[in-house]
Image (spheres, rainbow, N blue to C red):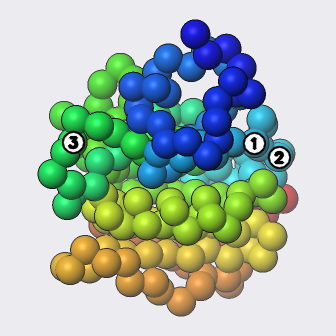
Amino acid sequence: MITNLDQLDLNATYSYADYLKWQFEERVELIKGKIFKMSPAPARRHQRISGRFHAALFNFLDDKVCQVYHAPFDVRLTPRRSDNTSKIYTVVQPDICVVCDDTKLDEKGCIGAPDWIIEILSPGNSQIEMKNKFEVYEANGVKEYWLADPANDVIFIYVLNTEGKYIGLHPFALEDVIASHIFPDFKLNVADIFKD
């Protein structure tokens, strides 16, 4: 039984089956089979930003089929182009995700791509982690991906095109109002998200 993260080889490749056996307190994500340690507890500002996104989406989706979830919430991903879905090598805990197909939900979280993911950058996020997440979200068909950068008070939005590739829109700054592409009626003032 694995009860301590130090018992694992961080250079090895692991599956979701391995992930389920781990009995340690540290929060980790698996991205392409590699372990990425998560921050023990997000900073206060990160929590406030996440809370604002969650509250706005919860209210917006109240009478709709889609549901919003926030970390910790396991999202198990298998690339759309993969021939072998029996092995899952990516388990992430997005800050916020919206799932519109309830057949993807089970007691452990979500299996398959949420429709929309919002991640909030933290000082602990590595460039490799962010690059890998971008790639797995795109490969798995996450229709819309927002990346909030509290250090610069900007939000980057990526929308999946018909070829299955992300198209990046211009950065949205404090003076902007942004709308979701999958929910055009959902609008947010960027300044309201980042206010202290």
Q: Residue at x 45, y 51 (%)?
A: 32
Left or right: 38 as drawn, with respect to 55: right
Q: Which of the two marks, 2 or 3, is nearer to us in this view?
A: 3
Residue 5 location in percent, x, y?
70, 27
Please name the amino acid that badge 2 sits on. Ala
Secondary structure found at label 1: loop
Q: Is residue 188 above or below residue 61?
A: below
Left or right: 167 as drawn, with respect to 156: left
Q: Which residue is drawn at 65% across and 41% down?
A: 10
- Whichever of labels 1 and 3 marks the residue nearer the N terminus, that label is 1
Please name the amino acid that badge 3 sits on. Thr
- Whichever of labels 2 and 3 marks the residue nearer the N terminus, that label is 2
**Tag 3 residue:** 85
Q: Which mark is residue 195?
A: none
Please name the amino acid that badge 1 sits on. Ser
Secondary structure found at label 3: loop
Left or right: 100 as drawn, with respect to 4: left
Q: Which mark is residue 43?
A: 2
